[in-house]
Amino acid sequence: MADADLLDRAARCYLMAGVGLDAARCYQDAGAHRAAADLLRQLRHYRESAEQYVAAGLTDEAAWVLAHLAGDPAAARALLSRSGSGSDTAQPTLTRRLALARCDVAEGVSAQQVLQALIDAQAALERRDTFQDRRIEDWAVAVAEAAHRFDHVALVFAAAVRGGRRDAAQRWQAWATRTFGAEIQIAESSITG
């Protein structure tokens, strides 16, 4: 196997030359599976990206890519089923539950589990003492959008604002402009209570 530093330098050269797939291959060969996965995701090679996320130990991320980006909820479910609960406890992680919720939406099943995952994401975003994992907000918004539950999109953003998530109000505004073609006024009472 080639030296990881040389492979990393080769990957950067390939990136500068606009040859992303070769750069991803270099990252993969160097054992930088997360970098390879992220790059493959940008290049819209979603199945290969998911494989690299699995190699990096990021099963929830791989399942999300399969369900949301590749449009293959069956593969995402199979991956999550093979990998177990995703933690040392019997409780699945919130990212895993959101990935499963995305599968549910794609397959048109279990609306109650989808809503519960969104409610739990809102609660997590609202807590100021939790780690600011942007995936929770991003994935919850994507699940709510896919389910055509724009009320829950707004609730997710409001929870993120209440939780002090950086630039959440601007993301909410941008979403509303993109979705409805108009700016919205966010009343202080809608985010504080």
Image (cartoon, rainbow, N blue to C red):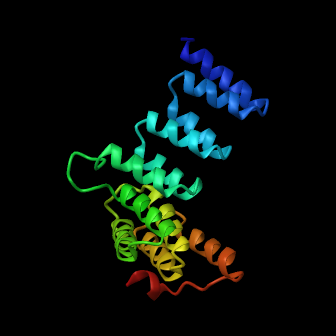
Residue under the image location 48 percent in, 54 percent down: 64
Left or right of residue 125: residue 18: right
User: Which residue appears farthest toward the right when viewing the image?
Assistant: 17
The residue lying toward the viewer, choosing from 106 and 122, is 106
Residue under the image location 60 percent in, 86 percent down: 185
Position of residue 60 relative to residue 137, above or below, is above
User: Which residue appears farthest toward the left when viewing the image?
Assistant: 89
Left or right of residue 121: residue 52: right
Q: Quadrant of the N terminus?
A: top right
The residue lying toward the viewer, choosing from 87 and 17, is 87
Position of residue 47 relative to residue 117, above or below, is above
Q: Quadrant of the C terminus?
A: bottom left
Number of numbered labels in the structure image: 0
Residue under the image location 58 percent in, 53 percent down: 70
Residue 101 is drawn in which quadrant? bottom left
Residue 165 in sight here: no
Residue 193 in sight here: yes
Image location (x, y in percent) of residue 100 = 40, 60
Left or right of residue 84: residue 181: right
Image location (x, y in percent) of residue 78 = 40, 49
Image location (x, y in percent) of residue 20 = 71, 34
Position of residue 55 relative to residue 151, above or below, is above
Image location (x, y in percent) of residue 156 = 45, 73
